Structures are given as structure tokens and as C-alpha cells.
Image (tube, helix red, strand yellow):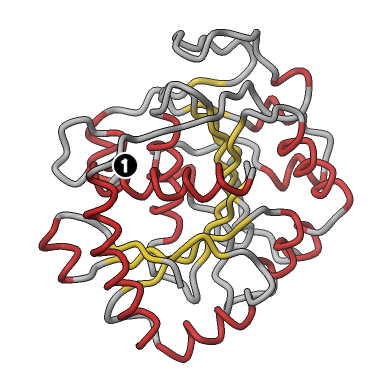
Amino acid sequence: MEHIRKALEQAEKDRAEVRKQADSGVFEAKQPAVQAAAEAAVPATAEIRYKSTKVVEVPDEVLERNRLIAALPNHELRDSYRMLRTRVLQQMTANGWNALAITSPATGHGKSLTAVNLAISLASEVNHTVLLADLDLRSPSVHSYFGYEPQVGLSDYLEGDVPLSEVLFSPGIDRLVVLPGREPVMNSSEMLSSPKMVSLVSELKSRYPDRLVICDLPPLLATDDALAFTPYTDGMLMVVEAGTTQSEDFERSLDILKDVPLVGTVLNRSETAARAGHYGYGRT
């Protein structure tokens, strides 16, 4: 558990540093790939009114029940995601990145919840918008955090003729659009590396240089999906859980990602982080 211990120690140092810094953001975005999903350009500080993208209003009780802390203004732990947002933005800005993938060594470590909360926190900046893509095709869950059951999902777009504009939805959070999954698919790694998916990712990343794309990927050791997708993302964020993530799994995951830029590690359920009211974050 040496790497996890070091990540936690670094997280403690990061907290002190981040408290001294103002949150910053440098991106502004419109909407995803195809023209039907593109909205009229508006100033970054203006309220966005979607014309093509479905808007799903999510009650506060759903946000609270599903631990979407970043969407609850008065939640005592909201600053944990604000600090994570700041550190992620610093890394992405320094490297000129606009696409970040989030994964974990194994299931049950909180990667999807981290992806959703981070996307919400990033979208709360007035200088950019965020597209959150659920690429965990074998176990799509991002939509469920918003209490929403989509009629169509990413696999319907990739395998059929469903327009992307019919798949996307906004959870009633300004500057945030979600590309959800729907039913689990078994040929997920082939789908993630298919020409249509590669074209979509390229479009999402390049159409608007001021947009942030956050991708929720499957666990690294469960399938080869995350590894198959690494050529199409700028960097990765690793989510591990104190007391759950095995050190050998963490080491194997780092080895898999040895050629991929790793933005950092989020350490969930750490007693030290919990006492401070934050999630741990550190560079590996």
C-alpha cells in the first residue's frame, strides 16, 4: 500500500496549497458532436437554454440520496470536489488538455460517483461547459445518479441510426451535458475502438476547443476496455478506496497505464481525509 500511503500524504500537502489558491477555469464549450446537438453560442456567464438537448430536472432529494455533493451548494463536503476540480484544471491547463478519463483498478471504488461529481464541479465554473460521457458500456450507471432512465444510449448511437441529439441530456445543471449508456453491452472493447466511436471522440475533443470532456471508463482490471480507450484521451485520473483497493491491483493498474499521462489519484474513504472533510488527492 506504499503508493496509496504516498498519495494520501501528497493529498494532505495539496489541501494546504489549494486553500491558498483561487479556483480557476479556462474553457468554455457549446454542445457535442453533431449539428443537431449544437446550441446557439451564448456568453459563458449567461444561463444556457438548450434547444435540442433534453433537459431533465433532478430534485434535490435525488442529488442528496445519490451523493452528488458537488450539486448541493450547502453540503459540508462540497469543497472536496472543488479542490479536486482545481487540481485537475491546473494539470489540464498546463498540458493543453480537454479530455480526461476516470478509472479504478476494480469495481466498487467510487469511480463513477467521482466522475459525476467532478463533472458537476467543473461545470459550476462559468468559463466553460462539460460533456460527461459514460463509457463503462458493460455497466453504465452515470444516468442513474440523476434518477434518469434513458430510452436510448451511447450503444444505440454506435450500433444504430439514433442521432446523438436524442441520446444527450442535461440534468438541469448549467453547462453540463451527459452522454449516457443504457443497457449493458458485451462487445464493449470493440465498440470503444470502433471507427464510429473514434470519430465521435475526435469530434467531441476538437469541435470546440473550449469544452471539457470527462469520460467514465470501466475498471482497468475487469476488462480491456479502459486500455483500448487510452489512445483517445489526454490523461487519466485513478480512483482507489482505502481499505478496499489491494496494493497488487494498484501496482498492476499503474503498470497498465505506464505509457498514459496520469493526472493523479483520488483516495476514497480515507480516515484522514474524512476527518478533514475531503477526499484524498495526490500525484503518483
Quadrant where the N terminus is found in the figure? bottom left
At 41% across and 88% down in the image, what residue appears? Answer: 247
Residue 170: x %, y % from top left: 50, 26
Q: Is residue 59 above or below residue 193?
A: above
Q: Where is residue 138 shown, x and y percent of the image?
A: 61, 62
Name the kind of residue labelled 1 in the image. Arg
Identify the residue at horizontal 48%, vertical 86% (top origin).
249
Q: Which residue does the image show at 49% across and 52% down from the upper left?
A: 141
Q: Please state if 160 lies on the left or on the right of 211 as rendered.
A: right
Provide residue 102's location: percent of width, then percent of height. Answer: 53, 58
Does 228 appear above or below 106?
above
Residue 271, above or below 204: below
- Residue 124 lies left or right of residue 104; in this view the side is left
Q: Quadrant of residue 162?
A: top right
Q: Which residue is mark 1?
A: 82
Q: Is residue 44 above or below residue 275?
A: above
**Residue farthest to the bottom?**
248
Q: Nearer the viewer, residue 176 or 182?
A: 176
- Pick the residue in front: 220 or 149: 220
